[in-house]
Image (cartoon, grey):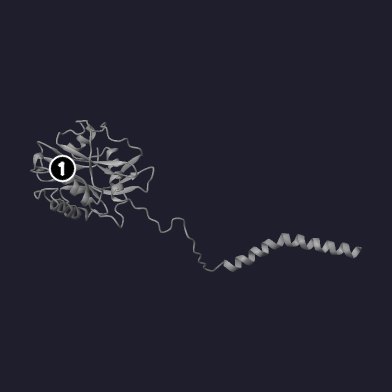
Amino acid sequence: MRQGKLYFFLFTAAVIGTSVWGPEALAGYKDRAILNETHLEEIEAAGEGFRYTLNSNEKLYVLSQCLSSQSLPESDQSAWTRNASANMDYQEITGTYAFVVNHKGPSGEEITDEEIYETCNRQLEALKGLGILPESVKEVEKASYNAVLYSAIDVLEPRNNVAVWKLSLSNSQKNANKENRLIDAYIDAETGKIYEFYVRTPLVWEKIAPDEMMEKWSSYMGISAPEAFESENPLLETTPCYKKYVFQGSGNSSTVATIGFYEGINELFLKISK
């Protein structure tokens, strides 16, 4: 009987000892197996290898919404036009959009501040070759233009963003000759394609074929074919010389683009903002 109690006591002591010292000893053994050694473990992250890319119509839509919802420094005529048309009957903006200066500068895939002027000149030549701009439009040069890199962002869906350069004729030179000069332009920071421009030309509105011009521009941008924008409001622009078009945007949304002309100063424009 006493021997049975002794066995029970020894068994109980062994169980208690194992429960107290066992985990610590096991942890120490595992530590010795991994400490002071390099171990490589492959982990497949969710979404690894996936990069979201906007198509041309989606980029056009995001930039259009951002430009239409912001108040930016620009040429007197285009700034006045943008502000004057702020309450026109375009489709309601359903998201929150921001157009902010990119202080980080261009990434490795974007056009640099040294390249933007040459890039713009190449694109101006491309637009001349398509008959969108007249041959008389002059090249841009760093000494006469300001270039600022912006990010157009859908705040509710930040992956929907477009990097663009805004090129503007400098106002530092008073009474500068603006004939045949590019006044403002928004340029894709990756492709260099020109989304929007204001340019002084010797043209007159009667000699401009907006339907043909818009078709050529949409092909140049790589976006879907335009459709005429029908509206009974004659005050959509501050000039009677204009025609509007609709492009497929993002999802069920659409983008409105305008070709117009300011008589008196002979300024031709193609814009995607209000």
In the rendered image, the vertical position of residue 228 relative to residue 33, given as above or below: above
Image mark count:
1
Residue 77 point in image, percent of width and height = 17, 37
- Of residue 26 and residue 126, the one placed in the foreground of this image is 126
**Residue indicated by mark 1:** 210
Instruction: Write the residue at 73% across / 62% down.
Output: 18
Q: Say left or right for 47 vs 210.
A: right
Q: Say left or right for 7 vs 196.
A: right
Residue 108 point in image, percent of width and height = 30, 58
Residue 37 point in image, percent of width and height = 54, 69
Instruction: Write the residue at 14% across / 51% down.
Output: 130
| Badge 1 element | helix
Circle 1 Cα neighbour tier, 10 Å, few/some/many (<14 / 14–19 / ≥20)? some
- Residue 267, image quadrant: top left
- Of residue 206 and residue 80, the one placed in the foreground of this image is 206
Q: Is residue 102 visible?
A: no
Residue 211 point in image, percent of width and height = 16, 43
Indicate the quadrant containing the N terminus: top left, top right, bottom left or bottom right.
bottom right
- Of residue 213 and residue 128, the one placed in the foreground of this image is 213
Q: Is residue 12 visible?
A: yes
Three-letter code, disc 1: Pro
Indicate the quadrant containing the C terminus: top left, top right, bottom left or bottom right.
top left
